[in-house]
Amino acid sequence: MLTLLARLLRALNSESGAWALAIAFVLGMIMGFTPLWRVHNLVILLIALLFRVNLSGFILSFVICSGLAFLLDPVFHQVGFAILSAESWQPVWQGMYDSAFWRVVQFHHTITLGSLVISLAFAPILAILSFWLVTQYRRRIQVWFNKLKIVQALKANRFWAVYSNLRG
């Protein structure tokens, strides 16, 4: 866990793009909110690995959002149930369920569909918010943070040794 936090701090303090970190947080959020063993999560993982997003930010976002997903499951269920029970969409859902491919994708499950819809709706907000937070951290907090006495004390700790080793 120390290594994961050290890598995230390294990414925050590096010259890597703020959008790259923001996209990592968004992909981790989508994967964390939705049930894990679904086809769309394999696609998200493939995107994260192909485009080489920051894996520390991706994993941290996934872990945090997986914990939040348990609290939000009733909301996900309500949204998914409302979408699946909409009368005008019944032919679409029936056609999808009749196809083997769409049954494997499992969009007929209320929590899967509701969590995917909510996470996709929240994705642009999280992307902009995390981009802003990363830029504000780099612009304001990083300099102030390094001057704190507790940070200077932590630099003598094992955490700082792990962080320094990762910096190269």
Image (cartoon, grey):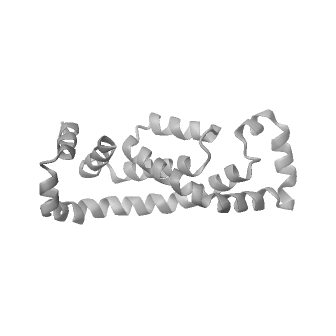
Compare residues 81 and 135 and report the one nearer the observer: 81
> Which quadrant of the figure contains the C terminus?
top left
Compare residues 3 and 145 and report the one nearer the observer: 3
At 39% from the left and 41% from the top, the residue drawn is 55
* 162 shown above or below 60: above
Measuring from the top left, give residue 70's x and y in whole percent. 58, 55
Measuring from the top left, give residue 128's x and y in whole percent. 44, 61
> Which quadrant of the figure contains the N terminus?
top left
Compare residues 16 and 24 and report the one nearer the observer: 24
* 59 shown above or below 104: below
Measuring from the top left, give residue 11's x and y in whole percent. 29, 47
| Tally of numbered tags | 0
Measuring from the top left, give residue 104's x and y in whole percent. 73, 36
* 20 shown above or below 42: below
Q: Judge left or right: residue 9 versus residue 29.
A: left
At 52% from the left and 35% from the top, the residue drawn is 46
Q: Judge left or right: residue 108 versus residue 4.
A: right
Q: Judge left or right: residue 153 versus residue 96.
A: left
Q: Judge left or right: residue 19 versus residue 95.
A: left
